[in-house]
Amino acid sequence: MGDEFVIEEVPADAREDGLVERLAGVWERSVRATHSFLAESDIVGMRPLVRAELVGIPQLAVAFQGGIPVGFAGASQGKLEMLFVDDGFRGKGAGAALLDHAVAHWDAHRLDVNEQNPQARGFYEHEGFCVVARSARDGQGNAFPLLHMERSEDARAQGAPLA
């Protein structure tokens, strides 16, 4: 399998149940590989929230390889709200392609990342983002600290490539 990904935006009215379920599977495999700080009950509890977010997020892009969804990104009002890549495709460029799409097409220059996920923080820092603030709890009030990141002005001004 090559490492070429096709990025497609999926409008809200085209998010069929089958696609949402496949993307929820991508999310779960990604989270299980990268979020070791989560308990099984946390993952199970998040499943319905993830499905609802996939349906309702204003901007959603999916990375396909050979017609199979291998990652996705979602944004709202210039903030990247989600970016997950199937565990078997991590490190192969899908995440960078999705992030590049979000920045270029949605002007997504802000995001939050779990402090307990240093791989994700490193990825975003490599792509020109820097930590600007920290919250002790996530958006649902859970004790999973978040790092608030923004793409640095230097990276924007220089037009730094994202990949």
Image (cartoon, helix red, strand yellow):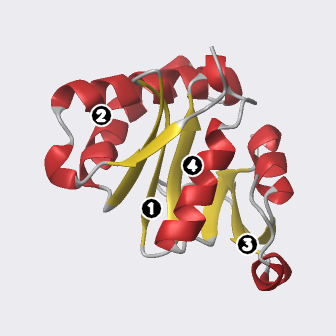
Whole-percent x, y for residue 161 in the image: 78, 63
Residue contact between numbered discs 1 and 3, judged by CB atoms under 8 Å: no
Circle 4 Cα neighbour tier, 10 Å, few/some/many (<14 / 14–19 / ≥20) = many
Q: CA distance from mark 1 to mark 4?
A: 11 Å
Q: Secondary structure at mark 4?
A: helix
Q: Which residue is mark 2?
A: 48
Q: Quadrant of the N terminus?
A: top right
* Crowd tier of the residue under label 1, counting other residues whose Cα lies within 10 Å: few below 14, some 14–19, many 20 or above: many
User: Residue 151 got which mark?
Assistant: 3
Which tag is nearer the camera, tag 2 or tag 4? 4
Which of the two discs, 1 and 4, labels the residue nearer the N terminus? 1
The residue at the point 24 percent across, 46 percent down is 55
Q: Amino acid at mark 4?
A: Leu
Earlier in the chain: of badge 1 and badge 3, it is 1
Q: Which mark is residue 98?
A: 4
Label 1 sits on residue: 75
Identify the secondary structure beneath mark 2: helix
Disc 3 marks a residue whose amino acid type is Arg
Between label 1 and label 4, give the one nearer the viewer.
4
- List x then y, in percent, for residue 15: 21, 41
